[in-house]
């Protein structure tokens, strides 16, 4: 859990030049190190009082002689890079790196709307030296709702080597996914990706994007309410944001429950049907070959079983 922190309280009397001024504008003068938006949020949260009475409207006009008190709660951003004891499923660890099996729904890096409870917060608690490393040693990421394997560096030497290995495509990442439609036995999707110019939360196949390739291998076919569903094994040759999700949707096979890219929910899934199932690379310091496999989490395992594939019948294809 996050460590409790003391909150600064600041008080001042409204002078003549503040008479008639909006409360939020006046607070900016009292605490200029905070943004107006943050100060407005403090008003809404009941952290501001005028002459001893709580005020919750930032538009309230002040009068000369009134005394304003504000509890300067820290911004969510300032809390982001703090240690939190979290249940990280670490499946391998040595002095240079660790490999974890990320749960679906867990954010990797703190960002707007998710300033705590992230993989980074958990790493800072598990391995305090992570605070000295770029991004706490995180060298690649998974989407919030994608489960599976990630490697994290624990020393600067390992982080530097892993970043170079990823850039050189020497860290091999393989995924299991459920996609709508009948995916071919084997397919190569080689299509450039860049930010969607219309919706900034999406990526898109567009000319001028970064080269991106995904190899797709069929593992099984089933049906949901008369619609074909394919179980697939995807191998990344590049690691672009949302790569598998966009590439399969571009081919007419969006992932189940991936509503961002047109994949309708099914089989009880509440997140895109995507799992980072295998991670393999040479140890960045020792050089020995490492390979890790993570079984499907419960939600995806149930979906595979409901399709009649059987979880035990999911060996990754040799690539």
Image (tube, rainbow, N blue to C red):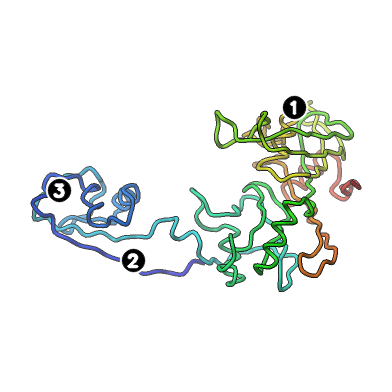
Q: Measured from the top left, where is residue 167 in percent x and y? A: 72, 51
**Mark positioned earlier in the residue sequence (3 or 2):** 2
Asked if the residue at tag 1 contacts the one at tag 3, i.e. Cβ–Cβ closer than 8 Å, the answer is no
Q: Which mark is residue 7?
A: 2
Helix, strand or loop status at disc 2? loop
Q: Measured from the top left, where is residue 65 in percent x and y? A: 8, 55
**Mark positioned earlier in the residue sequence (3 or 1):** 3
Q: Which mark is residue 24?
A: none
Residue under the image location 45 percent in, 55 percent down: 77
**Mark positioned earlier in the residue sequence (2 or 1):** 2
Helix, strand or loop status at disc 1? loop
In 3D space, how far apart are the residues under numbered discs 3 and 1 (Cα atoms)?
59 Å
User: Can you identify the residue that label 1 sits on?
Assistant: 252
**Residue at the right extreme, as displayed:** 318
In 3D space, how far apart are the residues under numbered discs 3 and 2 (Cα atoms)?
24 Å
Residue under the image location 65 percent in, 52 percent down: 141
Tell me where residue 52 sits by quadrant. bottom left
**Crowd band around label 3 with a 10 angstrom C-alpha radius: few (<14), some (14–19), many (20+):** many
Asked if 224 appears above or below 131 in the picture, the reply is above
Looking at the image, which is closer to me, 262 or 264? 262
Helix, strand or loop status at disc 3? loop
User: Can you identify the residue that label 3 sits on?
Assistant: 62
**Crowd band around label 1 with a 10 angstrom C-alpha radius: few (<14), some (14–19), many (20+):** some
In the image, 68: left or right of 237?
A: left
Q: Measured from the top left, where is residue 252 in percent x and y? A: 75, 27
**Crowd band around label 2 with a 10 angstrom C-alpha radius: few (<14), some (14–19), many (20+):** few
In the image, 77: left or right of 256?
A: left
């Amino acid at each position: 859990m996050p460590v409790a922190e003391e909150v600064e309280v600041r008080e001042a009397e409204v002078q003549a030049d503040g008479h008639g001024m909006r409360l939020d504008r006046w607070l900016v003068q009292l605490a200029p190190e905070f943004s107006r938006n943050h100060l407005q949020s403090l008003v809404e949260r009941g952290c501001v009082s005028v002459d001893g009475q709580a005020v919750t409207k930032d538009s309230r006009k002040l009068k000369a002689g009134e005394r304003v008190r504000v509890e300067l709660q820290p911004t969510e951003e300032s809390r982001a890079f703090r240690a939190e004891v979290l249940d990280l499923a670490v499946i391998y660890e040595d002095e240079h790196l660790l490999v974890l099996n990320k749960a679906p729904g867990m954010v990797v890096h703190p960002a707007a709307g998710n300033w705590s409870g992230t993989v980074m917060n958990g790493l800072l608690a598990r391995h305090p030296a992570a605070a000295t490393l770029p991004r706490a040693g995180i060298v690649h990421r998974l989407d919030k709702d994608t489960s599976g394997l990630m490697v994290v560096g624990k020393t600067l030497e390992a982080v530097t080597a892993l970043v170079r290995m990823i850039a050189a495509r020497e860290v091999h990442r393989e995924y299991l996914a459920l996609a709508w439609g009948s995916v071919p036995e084997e397919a190569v999707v080689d299509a450039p990706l860049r930010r969607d110019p219309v919706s900034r939360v999406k990526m898109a196949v567009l000319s001028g994007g970064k080269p991106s390739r995904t190899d797709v291998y069929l593992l099984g076919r089933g049906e949901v309410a008369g619609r074909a569903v394919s179980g697939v094994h995807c191998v990344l040759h590049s690691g672009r944001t949302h790569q598998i999700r966009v590439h399969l949707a571009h081919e007419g096979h969006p992932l189940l429950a991936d509503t961002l890219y047109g994949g309708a929910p099914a089989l009880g899934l509440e997140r895109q049907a995507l799992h980072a199932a295998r991670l393999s690379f040479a140890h960045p310091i020792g050089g020995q070959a490492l390979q890790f496999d993570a079984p499907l989490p419960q939600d995806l395992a149930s979906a595979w079983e409901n399709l009649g594939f059987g979880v035990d019948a999911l060996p990754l294809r040799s690539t």
